[in-house]
Structure formats: structure tokens, C-alpha cells
Amino acid sequence: MATAPDPWETRLGRSFDMEMAAMITAFQARGYVLDGFALAWHPRDAEAAKAGRKSDADTGRDLHREIPGVMLFRRDGWRSGGDVEYYAVFLVGDSQTFGVEPAAFARAARCALLFNGIGPDELQAARLVDCDLAAVPPTTRERGLDIIGPSFSGSMQSMAVALGNLCNGPCDERVRVTMLSPSASVGSNRAIVVHPFLARRDGEGTAPVEYHSLARNLATQIAGLLGHLCRDEGIPVENVTILAEESTFGGEALRLARHDPSAIGCGERLRISARQFPPNIASIRAEHSILRGAQREHAEAALPATRRLLELDMGGAEAASERPPVYQPSLTSRSDELMLYRGFDTMKVYRTPNVVVIVATDIRDRLFLLGEVRKALPGALPVMVELDFLAVHPDYRKASRGAVVLAAGEPVACLGEQGDLVACRAVVKDERCHAPRQDDVAGAGAANARGRTQKTRFPFATDHAANTFRAVVLLDEFREGNAPFGQFMARKERALAEPGEPVAYVATMAGFQGLGRKSYERRSLVAVADVRLAMQEPAYLALMLGGLFFVVAAVWLWLGECRGRVMLPFLRGLVSDFRSTTATAWRRCRHGRRVEATPCQNTTAAASLQPACRAAWLAAMTAVGAAALVIATRRLVELLQSSADNATRQPCYFMLAHGRDLHALACIWLLYAGLCIVAYMRLNVSNRRYAFYNAVFTRNARRTANRTRVITGVSWAVPVVCGLAAMGLVLLVHGRAVSIDNNDVWWIAGIVLATGLAFLVNLFWQVRLLGNLSLSLARTIAPVQAQRAIPDWPKPSAIREAPQTPFNLSLREYRRDMPALLRASPRAWAKRTLQVMRDAATSGPDAMNPWQFERWTEQLVAELKLCVVTIRTCAWCAMLAPVSVLVAMSVYPPVYERLLTSIAIMLLLLSFAATILVVLRLEKDAMLGLMFTNDGNTLTFGGALRALWPKFVAMGLILVPLAAPDVWSWMYGLVRSINSFG
């Protein structure tokens, strides 16, 4: 017989479904098929269940309290020359409050004792006995009662009473009771063998009851996890709070608070406190889910979309009799909600916990409390008991990410070739990430040759379902053997002990991953991770190409000392130089002549186009690019090697899919550092040229230079100081976050955001400097138009430039721009410009002929383009800072995720808005608006789109997945559908 969570008396109908499915799977794995069934429970009415009540047709139907259900399995032995064998399982409802149904249990036990182990001849006599009504029939042989249960630790008392009443008093020694529980995890359950109701009649020894549990002890698990965090992970755990339900299961966790903290291994400062959450938590959860569902329906009505997976329904608060009913839920739920948040406020004020352990039976209650803990205590490490794949459902994956899960058992069971339960993993000797596992490297033929058995794996949605599967198989194995149950279980426990079992599991973006110090302990349990798994190789390829680009660009800049390449578009310049170098090499090979390098035309002009400390900056740029290239290449090679043979895939293969890849995070930070180096070099070049301009165009040059120098320093210092102060404030308010992953790397995220803010400030400062320069240069318009008779100067047709939005201006290396900048130094050009302003360029000794005026105009255009290039680079750096942080959060678990995400999105929106303002400002610039647009006072819609479309794309790639997380899955499915046409 078996006990299962009562689908009517409790809210755990899903657990009943999972355990029934696990039983059917176990019997089928042992060679049985389902022959028939009769359940005492009828399905709930869907609408009534959703509303938390019983339907009219269901009222008064309580057959499950009186009679058990039965499932009959058949093994067709005649197919292999044997006999037909039947296996009957009697099902009794179970509840964590009142335990098993006594009447149904008594009938199920009598029937099981009557039919257990009888042959064809005894079956004819047993047919004359009504096992539902008769007492336990006397017999001279030992009778066995095998029980899979109880389902809850709180059911042990009712189980002992039911067993004691089975024989109208304690049973004699000829009745052997075997209890194998798949889910009861309280350690004191084993004391049932000395329960007074089960005492022997002669008063000697213990009752003939043997009890074993397949579920790991809860208190031992929590103590082991805390010890692992303190000893192995080096996490300073000082305050632990246990949120437990009002049950025996929750009471076991609460008793841990009274244990000696020094025995755990976290030192004398460890304090464990316990709190019970409101018993009506289901009503609070259901009402919040209904409100969110209504909001989601409005959003989906405005933008219809097809979901890839079914929605996780958190609104069910099914009517159950294990708890007193709520007679005024509209007020009771509000009162309980206030008390729940009062508890969170108390914890934040008086003792902020490092670790919060959530002990609840219903997975929906655990997920709801997990979300509330994330909001109220963002720096605490949440821990959930019982492994359930619903915890990593895409609807709640963001909330559960990084939470530790204490599994009652491994969610995967394995059977050998003979159908016996075996360990799923053999001894692992090599801990290297890319090394093949010793139990998987050989093929099937080699494994058989070495005497190894082939294993069949059975995955389950919950750890309790997997334990139910194991219980069925173990009892069937025990029935076929002759050893006592205690010896049999001791032998199987030794055989099933898996080396390198994880201390616990951590919820990730791709499922679960084992928690342990060694690589083979970090086993992966993936679920709905096909998109993230498929994107691993492309992601590392993109990171590798990014690192390679910065290395090649640094070498290209070093070789172009005389050409001012730092202000050029890198990719376009690399392609142009490659083509010219190829043509030069071809000419040299064809004509046999050596082509000499062109010397610098003007060393002063060339030096003005180079940043200060050029060698140091290029060395830093090479270093960050090479580091990203090496890291990404190594990981990509490991992934490709693992993909070549699925049997050699190690846990680290899935690190990026799980979102716990420190290597990818390092590559992202390095690539952004390379971009910042480029931007700083361009800012240095622009600021030096502005200093030359101010020295010539302004009256008090020294004062202007000092003010510019101070403001430039403040534009970098203030944002960085503000960013560091904000991080310090977060630590002061919330404390240091506790996580199983490295938290220190997220200090870099704060520095990145502060750097992005600094570039945003520099963006406006550069626009201000350009505006002042344009006002000075605008004084040349009237003299040129009057003296040179060019009434439309400086319109695009007069300066031979195509009309375009000024924000998209870029320098051209081999045409007019760079040759113009290399002909004269900024100081010399500024002095010539000053002569133009004073009408001295058309007469006198310094007069410019038309050819010289053309050269001066070309440098004017190039100088303004150079300033615009710096402005655009600042805009990109300001925008890519939050983008890099948001991308980094998808590859490595962040700390204070909600706060960090909010700050990053705010900075992204602010940068985008600032870019729009800069585009509009440049269109109306005193010089740029006239030189590069048909009408400087009017901004066309097409011109604005041309200026902003790269920013729209970059912003959409980040914000759309945040607003609609299924967009990547939709795109991946679209690609798969297109590929299927071929």
C-alpha cells in the first residue's frame, strides 16, 4: 500500500499527480503494465478549484475517507515462458495536519495483508473473504505489509495509531510492517519503532516495524549548507532566519535554531532565528496572482503574443480541510499580509539576515515567499527546501536565480540492465573542466567489456517523485530477495551512494546546478534551456572577435603614428589599409621595386593628432584585447571539443547557459575597457586642440585654459565619486550581499556605470566646447561671403560636402579630411582663421589665393568633423556602459539585481535622451547646421532617423528582452522553423 498527498483534503493535488506518475513509471521499468485502477478521488471542477471552493456536484462526496484507491499492474510472464503476475497498490490519502485516513488505511492494510505474496491456490480461498470488512485473518506464516509512506512527517502519529488498531491491539511478530517513506525528512521519525501503540504484546523488544526514509534529513541539510558556505566558500554567515510553515516539517527546521551554532562550523557569531509565516499565505498569493493576471491580460490585449510555455498559475487556493477555512478572506488576507511584511521590516531593522531558509510544502508558497524575500531583503541568500523544476519556470526564473535548493533526493533515478536501482554516477577521478568523465568516456561496447552495466535514466519534475520511483523499485527488489529489510536497505544505501554528491543545488537561468568545490560536483539539471545552450558558441565567438578587433586596432594605431588614426573609424580604416597594403605588395612583386614608406608631412600636425602617453594607452588597449581574446578563445575551444562528443561534456560546459560564467563576464568588462581607452584617447586629442583654439580665439586665453582644465577634471571626478558613494550607501543600508557566487566582481559594474555617467557629462561638455568654437568660427562667414563673393558659403554645395545630419560625420583617411589635418598644426590653422576673421586673408602680405583658401576650408571641415567624432564616441560610451552591465547580468548572477537593473535602465534612457538632445543641438549649431544641412533651422524626420537608428537598435536589443523575455525564444523558434523548410 502507499500513502500520497490527499488531492482533496490538501492543496497538493499536483504532488499526488507526480507520485502517481512516478509509480506507473517505476512499475513499467520493472516490467509491469497498468492493468486497471479505481481511485476514490474524483477530479476537481476547474472553475470551482480556481475559486477555492467545491462545486455543487462535489459537495458531500467523501468516499476517499472510507475506502482506498487501488492500482493494478500486470507482468505478462507468459511472453518469456513464465506465469502472469499481478501487483496491487492500495492508495490512501495523507495530510500533514491530520495524517492518514484511518478507515481507508484499515481497509487497505487488511486487503494488502490478505493478498500479499499468495499463490494461485490461496487466491481461490481469498476470494471468499471480504477484505474490506473482515479482521486480519489468522495465519501461521509471516505476513508482510509493505507501505510506501508516509508522505509527511506530521503523519507519523496517525500511522502509528492506524497500525496499532489494525489487529485490534498491537500486532504479533508474525506481522512484519515495512515503511519506506519517499518524502518524510524529519530525523526523529525513526523513533516510530518504539511508539507505545506498536509495543509488542509480551512487552519485550520493539515492534515488528521497520522504517526507512529516502528523503535527506532537513536539519542536517541546513547545517551542512551553512557549514559549506562558511568553510568551503568563505562566506561570512552570521545571521540566519528560517521562515517555516506551521507543521512538523516546519517544526524540524525551527528546532535547528535551538542547536549549538558552534557545531555548524560558522563560528561563535552565528545566530539562527526562526519565524513562522502566516498560515493563510495561499490566500495572499492567490490574490496577488489574480491582480497580476489582470494586468497581464490588458498588456497582451494591446500587444498579442504567443507564449512558448504554459503560464505558471499561482492563483489557485483550492478548498482544503487540513486547515480551518477563512470566513472573511477579503480582510483576513490583508491582515496576514501586513503581518508578513511586518516580519520583514523587523528583520531589516533589528537583525538583517545573511541567509533566509524558506520551509514550505507547496511550491507556489515557496515561490511567492522567495519573491517577497528578494524584494525585502535583497542582500540575503534565499534557500528553499525540496527540489522542484517549477522553481525555474521561465515565469519565475528571474526571482529564483541564485537561490539555493536543498533537495530531498536526486531528481534523476537510474536502473541497471536487470532493472535494479543503481547509482547514476561512478567514481570521477579527473576534476579538469575539459577532461572526460571516467564513467562516460568509453562507448557501450567498451563498457560491457569492462563489466559495467548500461544505465537507464529516469528524470522527474520533483525530488519526491524520484524518491517515490526509488521506493517502488526497492520494495519490488526486496520482495524478490531473501535478506531482511534492514540488511537489504543498508546494502542498497552503500551501492547507491554517489561520489561527489553536491551539498545542494542552485537555481540558474537554465535549470539547476550542483553546489560544490569540485567541478564534477557542479552537475547540471537543465530545463527549457535550448536557446541559452544554442547561444553559447555564438556568444563566445562574438567575444573572441571583439578581443581580436581591439588587438588588431591597437597594432594598426601603432603603425599609423604619422596619420592620426585614432580619430578615424577603425573598421573602415582597417579595411582601407588592408586594400592599400595588398595593392602595394602586388606592385612590389610585379615590378620588383621596393615601395618606401611615406614620411610625415608635418610632424607638429601629426603629433597634435596623437593622445598624450600614446604608447601606454596602446599597450593597455592591446592588453585588454589580448586578455579577452585568450579567454574567449579558450572557452570556445573547450565548448567545441565538448560538442564533438556529448559523452565528454563536463559541468563547466553549461556555465554560460546557466548564467554563472565568470569568463564571459571578464570578457565583457575587458571589451568595454577597450572602448573606454579609445574614447579617452579621442577626448585627449580633442581637448588639446580646443586648448590651441582657445589660445588664439579668446581674449583671456590663460583663464579660459585653466577653467577648461578644471571642468574637464571635475567631469571625470564627480561621476566616479558619486558612483562609489552610491555603492557605499547601498552597502550601508543593505549590508554586504551574500551569494554563492563571487560578489566582488560587481564592484566593477558600479565603476562601469560611473564611467558611463562620466562620459555622459563629457558629452555635454564637448558639445559646449564645440558650440563656443562654432561661434568663433561663425565670424568668418561674413568676410568670406563679402570678400570672396561666395554668397552661399558655407553651405554643403560651397564646401563640396553631401548634406547629412552632423551627428553622423566621420573623418576620411585618404580623401580630404586627414590630409587636411596633417598639412598644418592646429595653432597655425587657428592663426590663419583669425586672419580670415579680420579680412586680412584677401589683401596684404598674408592674403590667401583660391588654392590656399580651398585648403583652409578643407581643414575647417576636418576640424569640425574631428570634434563631432569625439562627441559621438562619448555618446556611445555613455550608452554602452549600462548595456554592458545588463548583458553582464545575463551571464553572471548579480547582487542587488533589482537596484542594479533599475540604475542601468535609467542611465540607458538618460543617455539616449541626451543623444537626441545632442543631435538636435548639432543640427542648429552655428557652423555645422549651415555646413552639412540644407536648412540649418529645420531638422527633417529622415535626418533624425539616420542619426539615431544605431542607437534605436542598440537600445531595442537590450530593452525589448527585458520587457518581453520570450522574444529570444520566439526568434530562436523562428530560425528553427525556417531551417526545417530545407
Image: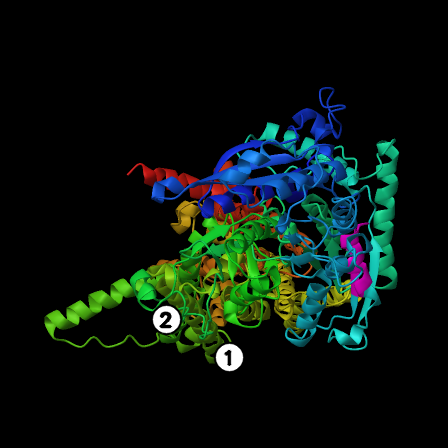
Inter-mark Cα distance, 2 to 1: 17 Å
As drawn, is 692 to the left or to the right of 80?
A: right
Rendered image quadrant of residue 196: bottom right
Q: Nearer the viewer, mark 2 or mark 1?
A: 2
Whether the magenta-drawn stretch holds residue 192 is answered as no
Question: Where is 23 relative to 185, above or below?
Answer: above
Q: From the image, tell me which residue sits under label 2.
A: 556
Q: Secondary structure at mark 2?
A: helix
Question: Where is 92 relative to 869, above or below?
Answer: above
Picture coordinates of residue 674, whole percent (x, y): 49, 68
Count of numbered labels shown in the rendering: 2
Rendered image quadrant of residue 359: bottom right
Picture coordinates of residue 654, whole percent (x, y): 48, 60
Visible in this render: residue 666? no
Whether the magenta-drawn stretch holds residue 245 is answered as yes
Residue drawn 86% across the image and 43% down it: 336
Q: From the image, tell me which residue sits under label 1.
A: 613
Q: Mark number for residue 901? A: none
Residue drawn 68% across the image and 36% down it: 7
- What amino acid type is highlighted by mark number 1? Cys
Are there few (<14), some (14-19), or many (20+) residues within 10 Å of tag 1?
few
Visible in this render: residue 425? yes
Q: In terms of depth relative to the viewer, which is nearer, 847 or 755?
A: 755
> Which residue of the protein is positioned furthest toward the left in this rendering?
591
Q: In the picture, which quadrant includes the N terminus?
A: top right
Picture coordinates of residue 33, whole percent (x, y): 46, 39
Q: Secondary structure at mark 1?
A: loop
Q: In the picture, which quadrant includes the C terminus?
A: top left
As drawn, is 168 to the left or to the right of 1?
A: right
Residue drawn 88% across the image and 34% down it: 331
Q: In terms of depth relative to the viewer, which is nearer, 290 or 553?
A: 290
Q: Which residues are magenta?
A: 240-256
